[in-house]
Image (cartoon, helix red, strand yellow):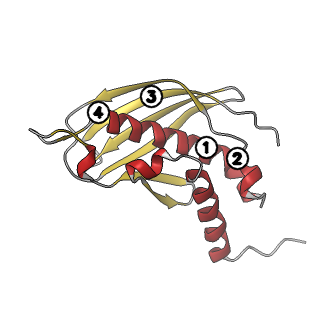
Amino acid sequence: MSRKPEPVHLVKQRRDAALNHLIGKIPFIGFLGLQFDRRGDELTTIMPYDEKLIGNLALPALHGGATAGFLETAAIVELSWAMMWDRMETGQPQETALPGLPKTIDFSVDYLRSGLPRDAYARATVNRSGRRYASVHVEAWQDNRSRLFAQATGHFLMPDRAG
């Protein structure tokens, strides 16, 4: 006997609650003002323009540290989201769906052009995720997805998935 499908509004509520629980664990998200656009299991990280993010007032251009923090946070959230997806979809409470956050081993940023004083978007791809180690690639753009202003690759120590 097959189970009746869960109503779509309940699925969306569960996924949104899980994402909010995840981003609530990272205070830096609030400092940068990051937002997340969730479409199914796909996340786009958004860094809305704020004057405090400008590093070079003469150009003006986004600060390299803000850009790096934006990319690293997008990578950690994507990796955590992918980690918790299966647990979340089986209905486990958010508290048990994510045992801990990945820890950065190294993170390398390629600054391809100046970040302009406007909203920025990033999408991360998990290249490899094992029990102990993960590799993630992140791309960031502003007006045109095919004109990246930065990209990064990070390696992360995975939390213990027991629980």
Of label 2 and label 3, which has the lower sequence position?
Answer: 2
The location of residue 123, given as percent across then percent down, is 43, 45
The location of residue 150, given as percent across then percent down, is 31, 35
How far apart are labels 4 and 3 at the CA level? 15 Å
SS state under label 4: helix
- Which residue position holds label 1? 80
Q: Is residue 71 above or below residue 52?
A: above
Left or right: residue 26 versus residue 72 is right
The location of residue 104, given as percent across then percent down, is 54, 28
Residue type pointed to by label 3: Thr
SS state under label 2: loop
| Label 2: few (<14), some (14–19) or many (≥20) C-alpha neighbours in 10 Å | many
Q: Is residue 150 above or below residue 81?
A: above
Residue drawn at the location 74% of the way across and 53% of the way down = 95
How far apart are labels 4 and 1 at the CA level? 24 Å
How far apart are labels 1 and 2 at the CA level? 7 Å
Given this view, does label 2 or label 3 mark the residue nearer the observer?
A: 2
- Which residue position holds label 3? 153
Q: Which mark is residue 98?
A: 2
SS state under label 3: strand
| Label 4: few (<14), some (14–19) or many (≥20) C-alpha neighbours in 10 Å | some
- Which residue position holds label 4? 64
